[in-house]
Amino acid sequence: MMMSSAILLSIFLFIDLSMICCSEKVVNTTFGCITRERRALLKFRESFRNPFPTLSSWNDDTKDCCTWQGIECDKFTGHVTRLDLGYESLLHSSNSLQSKMIDPSLLELKHLSYIDLSGIDFQFSPIPAFLGSMTQLQHLNISGASLSGVVPHDLGNLSSLSVLDLGVGRNLVEAINYPLKVDDLMWVSRLSLLEYLNMKDVDLSPTKDLLKVLNLLPSLSMLSMSRSRLNNTNLQHACINSSLSNVQYLDLSLNHFYGEFPCFLHNMTSLRYLDLSSNNYNSCGLNLPILRNLVQINVGYNSLNHNVDWINGFLSNKCQLKSLELGHNQFYGEISTVFQNLSGCWRHNLEILDLLNNKFYGHLPEELGGLKKLTYLGLRHNAIYGSIPTSLGTLSALSVLDLSYNELSGSIPSSLGNLSTLRTMDLYDNYLSGPIPSWIGNLRDLRNLYLSGYNGQLSGRIPLSLGQLSNLEELYLSGTTLDSTLCEAHFAKLSKLRQLVLDSFKFRVGFDWVPPFQLGALEMQSCDIEGQFPQWLRLQKEIVVLYLVNCSISGALPNWFHYMNLSVLHLSQNHIQGPIPNNIGRMLPSLRILLLEENYITGSIPDSLCELKFLNALDLSKNQLSGNLLDCWENFQQLAILKLSSNEISGFIPNSIGRAYPLMSLHLNNNSLTGKLPSTLRNCTFLRILDIGENMLSGKLPKWIGEYLIDLRVLRLRENEFYGPIPLEFCKLSKLQILDLASNNLIERIPHCIGFWGVIGTLVLKRSWRHVYFEFVDERICKWFVRNCM
């Protein structure tokens, strides 16, 4: 009986204790969710300006917060343990979350071990220090979340952390204007369990003894410090007692390192992924051959200067290597030597071979066909000659073949028709001969095709089978030796075509032709498309870049441009007549580049042009425009090139021109402008070219040109009515290469700045050199903008 009573008492005590232990859950739960934590999550939701539809499941009707989007709970206690609103989790969400800060309501979630807020727009607010008090965290990812300021040292309190991802991943302008910085990295050394550390785009330049900190992280296996403004001074004492033997992934790309590769690499015996690209290294040293376990290596975009013997030595023991990227360096030697050691184990696994933009020469060997797993072969921009090896046709896994900008000759081998997995074929700018083969239409997986007949003798008609490439997205064709007529059949099934670039072709399609594609970019140069703007163009509602240069187009600018969301409109060297549409600013509000040079356009520059506030380049030169200059240049805060030369524009240069601060190239020459050069131009400190020659401008030459416009390369003021002496301040223009002051009323006294005149003297008044230089500088600037728009 006593035994029974004791057992009964024990049972009651157990029940009482269970109720006490679980009282929080019984009292504060609603269908498995802790009420306090549910309220905290709802408060966190309210911190977003646009929580719906992304967080539509976070509502009062759904009581169990453990079922909400991005939330996971402990299945025994009901506590929220995981908050995942990151980019990967919300990949299919229709909008990106936005908030003015990371809300402190997260502090109520005391059992959180996992936070991922990557990709959320926190509007460049600082990383809150309170995150450092959430000591139960094991995973913290706030990468790409538009955060700025100094990373708080409080994060060093997160001693359980195994993943810390602070990678910025934003565009360059945002990274400069709203930087995320680390002023001292020592707090990281307290994260002894850290395995994954990503500080891509975080400014680490103030940190010293970087390796000293990293050596205190014994579990570290992944480290990314790409584009972190690091240089050699941040790696002081790097060779002393470095112990990074567990690191498998290292990314130091896009920094400012120089000289020889860092010596601490020789201790990183577990390294499998290494990225040192886009620095200024000039020597690989002796470290890389030691790294036997490498799977991927990228040392592209440096200044490495080694012959092919170094490559052979490196490859000799790399049995696991899958990706070798050496592009954009100064490696040199006979290209066939690279493939002499195909008996080595490296040939069995290699998938990516990038030797772009180096100094290799010679013939491609047939041994290339031995790289059976190769998916990417990049040999562009070398000096390789001879024929294309037929053995390339045996690379059944090949996806990208880039042999462009070499000196290859002979015909395109028929064996390439066997490459059923090929997605990109780039044979542009070689010396190939013979016809474009009809079997090209059998490469049904082809996405990108680039062929040129310029240098070589590619001849015959373009095969109609080209029109069967139903997956083709980009097509570049140019040639003067080809039968250069293209018709509707050449595009019959190209429904996925997004970018079409044609040079020196006749384009012959019916008036009522309906293309099967919706282009994003169309570039036609020196093509004959017959008469006025083709009607099929008005059906291209998704086009962003329209480039029709020297295509013999006549007639007025069409009003159906407003159906397009154009960023680039380049219609130079045609026969376009009539005025610029009065509503062009409303027709094309997203326009960034407008180039209408060398046409027959008349009338005045319409006021609505002032609404094109995103313009990077405007060229209306060599037309028959009249009237005054616009007086709204303060609207153009992205304008780098302005060319209005060789028209009939009159009146004053408005003061507002000096409020277009980004101007790099200004051409107002060969007009009928009067008055003085506005002093506000001193604000345009980025100017490299200033050409206001052949006008009727007057007054003394301004001293402020030499004081403020110190980046000038070209200053051209000829054939005006300027008078007085040449200011001594012009001697400060140390970068000037062309100075043309001829045919004014200047006092003939040249300032005694010998070094200055020694540099530019031979170029003064050289009209042909001046023209070439203008075109070179403007073309480089303009091409940069076009490339970014595309």
Image (cartoon, grey):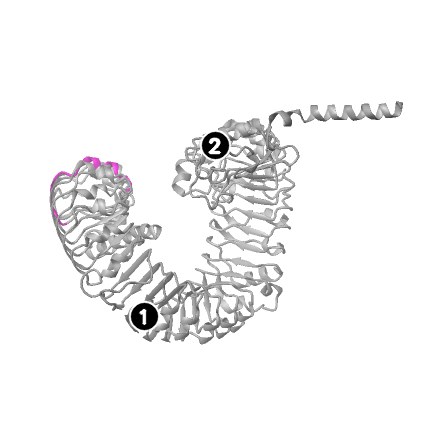
Is residue 129 visible to the viewer in this orientation of the structure? no
For label 2, the crowd category at 10 Å Cα-Cα, with few meaning under 14, some 14 to 19 and many 20 or more, is many
Amino acid tagged 2? Arg
Vertical placement of residue 555 versus 175, above or below: below
> Residue 318 occupies which quadrant of the picture?
bottom right
Q: Closer to the N terminus: mark 2 or mark 1? A: 2
Is residue 516 visible to the viewer in this orientation of the structure? yes
Please say whether residue 576 is one of the residues in the magenta stretch.
no
Mark 2 = which residue?
Answer: 45
**What is the residue that sits farthest to the front in this orientation?**
1
Q: Which mark is residue 489?
A: 1
For label 1, the crowd category at 10 Å Cα-Cα, with few meaning under 14, some 14 to 19 and many 20 or more, is some
Q: Position of residue 346 (x, y in %)?
A: 60, 63
Q: Quadrant of the N terminus?
A: top right
Q: Which residues are magenta?
A: 670-686
Local SS, label 1: helix
Q: Position of residue 601 (x, y in %)?
A: 14, 53
Please say whether residue 677 is one of the residues in the magenta stretch.
yes
719 left or right, relative to 141: left
What's the CA distance linking mark 2 and mark 1?
A: 55 Å
